Image (cartoon, coloured by chain):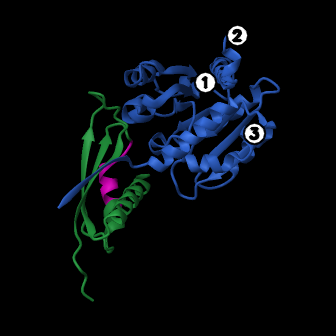
């Protein structure tokens, strides 16, 4: 018997494509956000609310992933931004190859913000790097406060948690402070914004969160020579 | 739920390795998985067995080393650590 040490990532093909995507997004100065949450957490509605409120002239686009149907793309297309549906035909997550394939020429045209709505699932999408700048996890108050403890992977990797449907709080036993405490137990650095599409809550804070990162991304994309001392 | 894709990627990597050692077959493979990798061991083993069953790869043992997010481990590991090779027996017709 002969043991061959391989020491290779199982998903190395995805990692390679994600690295290529990340480089392309960096040179285009495009901020990419990967939205992950359970089915029904409100990802599509939140993106609708965001698209309605983006400052005019923002160059944004949406990729939305589902196992079947174009329904989410149809919902999101109403706001005038380019939207492409990725149907995974059974796969429970988006992978970097799907994103690369559906991007088309968007990055050549000065895209500032790429919103990627992953397939509704708190587990599998966590393992697949899409080249994004940040993962954003959506948790709704119709779920349990212990979701961060049950699914620590995504709460550890996410930079922002949107605690969604807070307009329902008077009607459900959900304790928001407990949910936030659980999320911070898993990831002390996570940012948390309470949101509601129906009541229009949280969008200003969320837009500021995005704008700061988008500006930084754009600034970093400028040729380094611009920052070099004048000789 | 994505364990089938993972099992498939693992077997592809094993095939690649066997390509380099044409006179061998794989008897055992070792994976290293972090506690936050989002992988369920039971379903990974189920998918793995389903993919191997009835193929020339059978029998193929799967060893999983779980690692916690400490001592420099991120907990996100999903690595193919090793493949054990043995000389392949001639299959008589």
Q: Position of residue B17 (x, y in %)?
A: 35, 60
- The disc placed on residue A195 is 1
Q: Position of residue B85 (x, y in %)?
A: 24, 62
Q: State whether residue A3 appears in this view.
A: yes
- Check disc 3 and report its element: helix, strand or loop: helix
Q: Crowdedness of circle 1 by 10 Å Cα count: few (<14), some, many (20+)?
A: many
Q: Is disc 2 in the same subunit as disc 3?
A: yes
Q: Is residue A108 above or below residue B44?
A: above
The image quarter containing residue A4 is bottom left
The residues tagged by marks 2 and 1 sit, at their Cα atoms, a distance apart of 50 Å
Q: Position of residue B42 (x, y in %)?
A: 30, 53
Q: Residue at x 72, y 38 (%)?
A: A107
Secondary structure predominantly adopted by residues drawn in magenta: helix
Question: Which range of residues does the magenta coloring cover?
Answer: B38-47
Q: Residue at x 42, y 33 (%)?
A: A147
- Check disc 1 and report its element: helix, strand or loop: loop
Do residues under tags 3 and 1 come within 8 Å of each other at their CB atoms? no
Q: Chain of mark 1?
A: A
The residues tagged by marks 2 and 3 sit, at their Cα atoms, a distance apart of 32 Å
- The disc placed on residue A108 is 3
Asked if the magenta segment contains residue B46, the reply would be yes
The earlier-in-sequence mark between 2 and 3 is: 3
Q: Which chain corresponds to the colour green?
A: B
- Could you tell me which quadrant the N terminus of chain A lies in? bottom left
- The disc placed on residue A231 is 2
């Amino acid at each position: 018997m002969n043991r061959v040490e391989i020491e290779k990532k199982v998903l190395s093909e995805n990692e390679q494509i994600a690295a290529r995507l990340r480089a392309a997004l960096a040179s285009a100065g495009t901020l990419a956000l990967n939205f992950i949450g359970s089915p029904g957490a409100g990802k599509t509605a939140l993106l609708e609310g965001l698209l309605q409120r983006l400052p005019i002239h923002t160059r944004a686009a949406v990729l939305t992933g589902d196992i079947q149907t174009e329904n989410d793309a149809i919902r999101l297309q109403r706001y005038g931004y380019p939207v492409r549906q990725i149907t995974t035909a059974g796969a429970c997550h988006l992978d970097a190859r799907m994103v690369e394939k559906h991007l088309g020429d968007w990055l050549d045209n000065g895209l500032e913000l790429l919103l990627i709505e992953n397939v509704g699932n708190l587990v599998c999408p966590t393992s697949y790097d899409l080249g994004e700048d940040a993962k954003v996890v959506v948790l709704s108050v119709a779920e349990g406060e212990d979701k961060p403890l049950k699914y620590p992977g995504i709460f550890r990797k996410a930079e922002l948690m949107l605690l969604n449907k807070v307009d329902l709080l008077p009607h459900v036993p959900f304790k928001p402070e407990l949910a936030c405490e659980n999320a911070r137990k898993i990831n002390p650095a996570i940012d948390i914004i309470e949101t509601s599409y129906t009541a229009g809550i949280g969008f200003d804070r969320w837009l500021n969160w995005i704008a700061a990162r988008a500006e930084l991304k754009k600034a970093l994309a400028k040729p380094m020579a611009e920052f070099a001392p004048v000789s | 739920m994505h364990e089938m894709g993972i099992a498939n990627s693992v077997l592809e990597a094993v095939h690649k390795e066997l390509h380099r050692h044409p006179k061998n077959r794989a008897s055992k493979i070792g994976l290293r998985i972090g506690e936050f990798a989002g992988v369920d061991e039971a379903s990974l083993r189920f998918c793995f067995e389903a993919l191997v069953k009835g193929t020339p790869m059978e029998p193929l043992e799967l060893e999983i080393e779980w690692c916690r997010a400490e001592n420099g481990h991120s907990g996100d590991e999903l690595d193919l650590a090793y493949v054990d090779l043995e000389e392949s027996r001639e299959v008589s017709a």
